[in-house]
Amino acid sequence: MKSTGIDFFDVDHTLTQRSSGRHFILMGIKKRIFPARYLFSIPFYYIYYRYGNINIAFMEQGFPQLNGIRENTLENLSRESFEKKLKNDIYPGARVLIESLKQKGREIVFATSSLNVIVKPLAEYLFVENIIANNLEFKDGICTGVFTEAPIFGKSKREKVLQFIKEKGYSSADCSFYSDSIHDLPLLESVGNPVAVNPDSRLRRIAKERGWEIINFK
């Protein structure tokens, strides 16, 4: 039976309290997959994303730090960081919301600028079948550090989601998008039901001005 519509969810700070990438990097440093100097980049990326103005050119760099690492190493690291860290970071209210939407016949899709390899264990845990995320390129099982296609971020995330909606035979009016970030404003403006979840200050102000639903998970 066809679902009644699609509910898209951002991941970091929307479904989880902290960044999935943060857990991934810290676990990689602990297991000596990544050098310890990567620890100093975490605050920079967080501040730049949360309060700065990341653009597509910045995202197009990919993750050169991952160049040369085997695919199965990254997959195993992702699963371990999920089991030991990210699983406990899921907002209980987010889990309840996703289950209630499923019971109403809604399809759930993750739409995130994080890496597919990082969020896949979370999707499997919450029984979410479709993920729209950035995919790393692998050659002969070795990561090159670049994306397989244009980065999914901002307007490009919007285009990717709208394409998915069209392929599924829905109208964007039938869909919702849940996000915490001002960077997701293009997509929030393009669906029938935009929802600001734990929004940053800029998104909270816009959501209030436009009368969008605001959810604050604890």
Image: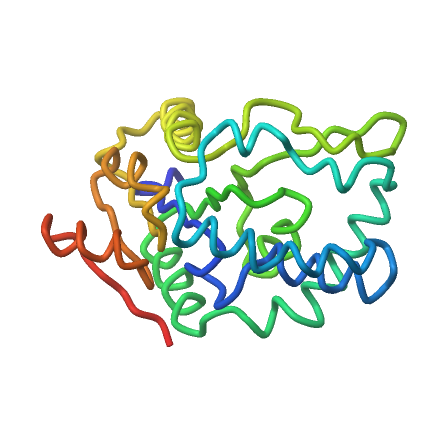
Residue depicted at x 64% and y 33%:
62
The percent coordinates of residue 8 (x first, y second) are: 39, 45
Q: Nearer the viewer, residue 89 or 53?
A: 53
Q: Name the image quarter holding the N terminus.
A: top left
Instruction: Left or right? Give the position of 8 relative to 176.
Output: right
Task: Classify 17 as above or below 131.
Answer: below
Residue under the point 78% across and 49% down? 75
The residue positioned 43% from the left and 32% from the top of the image is 157
The residue under the point 85% across, 49% down is 73
Q: Is residue 103 above or below residue 85?
A: above
Residue 9, given in percent of the width and then of the height, sits at 41, 49
Query: Which corner quadrant of the image does residue 80 belong to?
Result: bottom right
The residue nearer to you, when weighing 120 against 50, is 50
Q: Quadrant of residue 50?
A: bottom left
Give the image location of residue 97, x and y in percent.
36, 64
Image location (x, y in percent) of residue 154 = 40, 34
Q: 49 left or right of 201? A: right
- Side (left or right) of 147 relative to 30: left
Counting labels gives 0
Q: Which colour scheme is used?
A: rainbow
The quarter of the picture where residue 133 lies is: top right
Image quarter where the C terminus lies is: bottom left
